[in-house]
Every structure is written in structure tokens, then in C-alpha cells.
Image: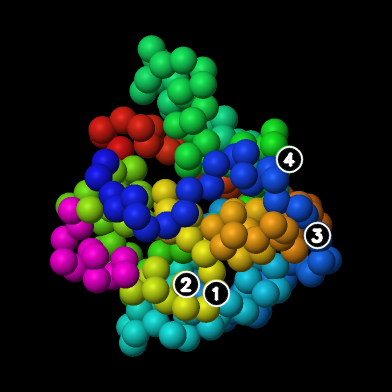
Amino acid sequence: MAWDRTKGTPEPIRLLNRVKERENGEPLVSILEVAPKVKILRPQVIPYVRETIAKMCQEAAERLPENMYLGLVEGWRPLERQQRIYDHFWQCALEAFPDRSFSSLRRTVCRYIAPTDQKAPPGHCTGAAVDVHLVNDQNEPYDVSSPLTGFGAAATYALGLSETALKNRSILVETMLSVGFSNCRDEWWHYSWGDAGWAVRTNQDSCPYGLISLERSLYFHLEKEHEETTKARQNPFLPSA
């Protein structure tokens, strides 16, 4: 995968773990209420994020060109969902790279899904991170990847994108950055503010958000939906994906 390594900031786990957590107590809020211009793109999405994040998403949605909408793919995650995704990726990596060492597999998996066994909590579990796409009024995605596919297109500053894909991806990136989000350079769709990832990317020594929980009754049915969709996902590390 070719990408411009001069852009974006690496965020190794050792640096994430050095960030001092200074939880400010800001609540999770419904993005449906605080950011009505944001579209929910998947039935298993738990539509909650920190209040500041919801307001920033609304502002980003308002800044997009006409006929472009911000679509939420993932917001806050409970730790059990984070671990479920991690376990799925681990099994996929084992299948795709059976001859790799444990440390090599862990580096590959941790590039795309944060582990739950570290001092720094995963961004989604703090309510600070969102995964977003650009869609039209029918929730159909705009091209941000062609002719690349799968993880070959994941790096935010991937090289070799078509003119259309590069234009659309640039609109998303620039809009999200313009309202204060930081981007994970390994995932064009992942943005955050206030978590350890944001702190590393913006050279801060502390962050205002740590792990936060939500009343389970608000998302229990969505976890069942997520369990089923995870089982049906293709292996992202294989060419067929």
C-alpha cells in the first residue's frame, strides 16, 4: 500500500499510554438530538458520543457542500463491542497470515482496531471518536477510494486515488479537520477529539476524556445486531475483501 508518510501523525501504543487522562465528566448525548444533520448509516450504530463531539459533527455536516451528508458508521462503543471487533480481526489475521509471529500479527491488528488491554482506552470507548462517511440524500456513499479497495485504500493519504475519489476524500478530511477533529492517518474514516489518540496527534500531554459507560438498556438490542453483523463480515486482510 502506497501512501504519503509526510502527512498525518503516527500514534504508537507507547505514546498513547503516556497521555495523562483528566476526565472532565462531560456526558454522552444522543447524536440524533444534538446533530440532526448527521445520518446514521448502520442499524447497529449506538448513536451516542460526548456532547462536544456531537456538536462538532453537526458543524461539520453544516459545512459540507450541497447534496453531501455526513454519515455516522460508529460512535461510542462499549468495551465488549471493542473486544468483539478485536477478536474478529485477530481471527482474520490468523487466517490471512498463518506464518506470522504473534508480535507481527498484533501490530497488524492494532493498526486498525485498538486493544482493550492498554492504559490508554480505545477512542470509541471514550465517546471521543467517530467513524464517518460521505453520502448523498439516499445514504449512498460517495467514492473516496477507487481504484483502490479494502485496506489498500484505508490510509488517509493513500496514493493512486482517482481524481473523483481524491476530491471527495479531501472534502471529508478537510471538513472534519476544519471543525477541530484530528484524523487517524491509517483510517480515512476515523476522527476524534479529546481522547489519547487526539492528544498524540496534536502533541498534547493530557486528554479530557477517558472510558465512559452508557445505560445498557439504551443499546442492548444494538449489541445483538452487532454480534450478527460481525459474524457475517468478510476477512479484511484477504484479497477478496
Q: Look at the picture and state if 113 lies above or below 214.
A: above
Label of residue 177 in the image:
2
Q: Where does label 3 land, which residue?
A: 22
Q: Where does label 1 land, which residue?
A: 180
Calculate the distance from the C-alpha at mark 3 to the C-alpha at mark 4: 13 Å
Circles 2 and 1: CB atoms closer than 8 Å: yes
Circles 2 and 3: CB atoms closer than 8 Å: no
Circles 3 and 4: CB atoms closer than 8 Å: no
Question: Looking at the image, is mark 1 or mark 3 earlier in the sequence?
Answer: 3
The boundaries of the magenta stretch are 160-170
Q: Nearer the viewer, residue 138 or 30?
A: 30
Q: Is residue 12 left or right of residue 156?
A: right
Furthest residue toward right: 25
Q: Secondary structure at mark 2?
A: helix
x%, y% of residue 172? 38, 70
Q: Secondary structure at mark 4?
A: loop
Residue at x 48% of width, y 39% of height = 111
The amino acid sitting under disc 4 is Lys
Q: Where does label 4 land, which residue?
A: 119
Label 4: how many residues lie within 10 Å, few (<14), some (14-19) or many (20+)? Answer: some
Calculate the distance from the C-alpha at mark 4 to the C-alpha at mark 1: 25 Å
x%, y% of residue 119? 73, 40
The amino acid sitting under disc 2 is Leu
Residue 165 belongs to magenta span? yes
Q: Quadrant of residue 47?
A: bottom right
